[in-house]
Amino acid sequence: MIFLPASGNSVSPALTAIYAAKALRTFGFGLSSVVFALFLKDCGFNAFEIGAVLSATLLVDALATLFVSYFAERIGRKKVLLFASSLILLSGLALAFSRNPLLIAIASIAGIISPQGYEGGPFGALEQALVSEMVPAEQMSR
C-alpha cells in the first residue's frame, strides 16, 4: 500500500517514516526468510529443532498481533512500536554475535523473526491504524 498525495498535498513526515520503516522491514524479512533455516542448520540445529523454532516464531507473531490489538490503545502505539523494534534490534545482535543454540532460539522467537517471507508480529496492525488516522478520509482508498 503506497499513499500518493493528490497534487498540492504533501505526505507528513510521520507517514513517510511509517512507509520507510515498512519498506526496510519487508526487505529484511524477505531476505531472512530465504536464509534463516540454513542459518539455524549452520548453527547446529537439526531438522526437528529448526521446525520447532520456525513454528514458535509463527506462534509468537500471532500472539504479538493479538497483544497489540488489545493493548496498543492503553499503552500507546508509539511505545509498542518502539518496543517491538527494540526486540528486533536485540534479536539481530544476538543472531549476529552468538553461536549458542539456546540464545539463538530465544532471539529468533522473541525477536519477531518471520519465516513466512513477510513481516509478522505487531507492525502491520499498528501501522494500519496509524495510517488510517493520518490520511484524510477522501484519500483513504489511494
Image (cartoon, helix red, strand yellow):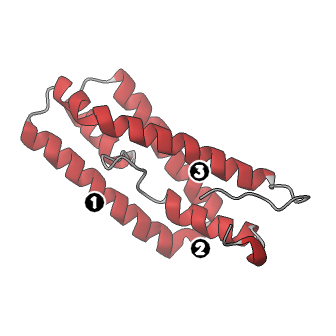
> Could you tell which of marks 3 and 1 lies nearer the N-terminus?
1
Helix, strand or loop status at disc 3: helix
Helix, strand or loop status at disc 1: helix
Which mark identifies residue 82?
Answer: 3
- For label 2, the crowd category at 10 Å Cα-Cα, with few meaning under 14, some 14 to 19 and many 20 or more, is few
Task: Give the alpha-carbon distance from disc 3 to disc 2, as whole Å.
Answer: 15 Å
What amino acid does circle 3 point to? Leu
- 3 or 1: mark nearer the eye: 1
Which mark identifies residue 74?
Answer: 2
Residue 120 picture quarter:
bottom left
Answer left or right for 105 relative to 14: left
Residue identified by numbered label 1: 59
> Could you tell which of marks 2 and 1 lies nearer the N-terminus?
1
Which mark identifies residue 80?
Answer: none
- 2 or 1: mark nearer the eye: 1
Task: Give the alpha-carbon distance from disc 2 to disc 1, as whole Å.
Answer: 23 Å
Residue 74 image point, x, y percent: 59, 73
Residue 63 image point, x, y percent: 35, 65
| Marks 3 and 2 in Cβ contact (< 8 Å) | no
Helix, strand or loop status at disc 2: helix
**Closer to the camera, 129 or 103?**
129
Answer left or right for 38 relative to 63: left
Residue 113 picture quarter:
top left
**Closer to the camera, 105 or 27?**
27
What amino acid does circle 1 point to? Leu
- For label 3, the crowd category at 10 Å Cα-Cα, with few meaning under 14, some 14 to 19 and many 20 or more, is few
